Amino acid sequence: MSRLETRPDRFVAIAVLMLAPTAALLGALVIAGRLNILLALAAFALVAAVTAVARHLVLRDSRLIAAYLDQVRDRRTPLPPPQARTLTGAALLEDIAQLHQNWLRHREEIEHRLAADEAVVEALHDPLMLVDDKRKVGRANSAARALFGDRMLNRDLAVSVRNPDVLAAVDAVLAGGDSRRVEFTLPLPVERVLEVRVTPFRPAAEDGAPEHEITAIVTLHDITAIKRSEQMRADFVANASHELRTPLSTLVGFIETLRGPARDDADARDRFLAIMQEQAGRMSRLVMDLLSLSRIELDEHTHPTGETNVAQLVHSVVAMLELKAAARKITIRVQGGEDLPRVQGDEDQLTQVFQNLIDNAIKYGREQTDVVVSLERAEAPPAPGATGIRARQAPQKVAGIKVSVTDKGEGIARTHLPRLTERFYRVDAARSRALGGTGLGLAIVKHIVNRHRGRLTIDSEVGKGSTFTVHLPGVEKAAEKAEKPVPQSAPNLSQEGGRGAA
């Protein structure tokens, strides 16, 4: 209730002060004989009545004003002011109504502006966090929550970002330092390089209000593509210069021979031209594989968005390689593949994976044997190194599939398995080159599987053959995606080996 309603005694005092001078004046006139007592009483009664009516009107308008102020305080929608009878009350109510409407319009403008700013921050592709003077995360946009999880809010930044350089930069800015930039590597789920920018932020203080503590705005920018582009150029030059040196030297030597001693030797010319064609083909395959590997590594940190039927894709690859297998009297048999979940992945890249694996099985398998391609539903394997508490806290993965390619070749010694997915690593370099291999096949497979958040495993026994298995997670259903909490960090992905394949 307003103070205007709770203090009517003020109006009584005002009425008494108004009537007292009138009564004194009329009494003096009566005593002096200039006014009849009846006329004096009538005049006093008239003044008292006018005063009472004025008091009633003022009290009524004060109650109207008090009630209207209560409505303004409790409601956000503008209300029409009540009708006041006094000029002062009417003007006051109109002023209050105008001020209320202006305040509501100003508040709506501020709310719209805040909503627009919030939408812009939420829509930012880069993670953004606001850290208070105690290094607690007060605000985080959707990109930051997707990267580190919702649990990062109202907790120390060190819970989500465990890099000491980043934390030191944030502490330095909170202590009053200038902006800082730090680069660090996020190893999970696929290694990414992030640039962290820490900027001091001091909210503007109102006049007379104490200054706020310094806070910090932390933004993360993914510079993986830039770093990989630089590394890709360096690797391409190094690999190309190393691997192309031998065939180029061979071509130069044969050309000099054909232009010199073997100019008129038809048999030597035909033999040398066949070798030159083979070496030129090898250089062409090498360059194509290097370019393909560079493109795959550049996009490895981005998860594919399409959906793929792996069983249908494997049958297509098998049909494409049947003639090559028949040339070595090898039969390709496909087992399983019924009722398998779809895989979220790039169809062209997955085709390249299974084409490389089955082609390797044909090359390195014995003649007149079988290559078995097995497809089955399987739970996604745990990440390497995720043991103990970390393994129990890891989110449950969606059921996926595994595709195994088994050959009956010479097998691979276990000492070679950890390095087989390295570039140009070969168990038998001479045999690999003789079969047309570039040494990049399994490196390509590894990076494609990593991009699909899958895993490549190998089981090989010398004298019996090898089995290459690709594990791929299935497509996550919308209901499961909504129920599953966002992890602070995704499980690690790596390969357990591979063949230095073509």
Image: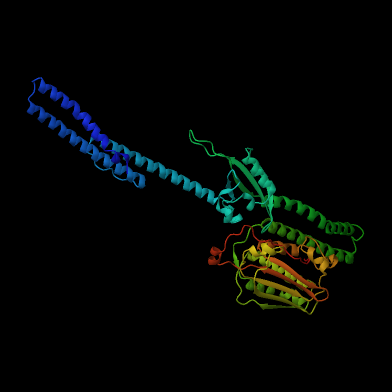
93 and 128: which one is in front? 93
Give the answer, above or below, for where 227 lies relative to 393: above
Query: Residue 160: in sight, yes or no?
Result: no
Q: How many labels, in total?
A: 0
Q: Position of residue 405 (x, y in %)?
A: 72, 73
Q: Quadrant of residue 42?
A: top left
Q: Is residue 310 left or right of residue 238?
A: left
Give the answer, above or below, for where 399 lies relative to 63: below
Colour scheme used in the picture? rainbow
The structure residue drawn at horizontal position 19% and vertical position 26%, both measured from the top left corner, is: 21
Q: Position of residue 32 (x, y in %)?
A: 10, 19
Which image quadrant: the N terminus?
top left
460 and 351: which one is in front? 460
The structure residue drawn at horizontal position 13% and vertical position 32%, both measured from the top left corner, is: 46
Which residue appears farthest toward the right when viewing the image? 261
The structure residue drawn at horizontal position 82% and vertical position 55%, both measured from the top left corner, is: 242
Which image quadrant: the C terminus?
bottom right
Q: Quadrant of residue 396?
A: bottom right
Q: Quadrant of residue 379?
A: bottom right
Q: Position of residue 487 (x, y in %)?
A: 61, 59
Q: Is residue 305 left or right of residue 89?
A: right
Query: Residue 165: in sight, yes or no?
Result: yes
The structure residue drawn at horizontal position 81% and vertical position 58%, both measured from the top left corner, is: 243
Q: Position of residue 483 (x, y in %)?
A: 54, 64
Which residue appears farthest toward the top when viewing the image? 32
445 and 238: which one is in front? 445
Give the answer, above or below, for where 160 lies relative to 373: above
3 and 318: which one is in front? 3
Which residue appears farthest toward the front when viewing the image? 31
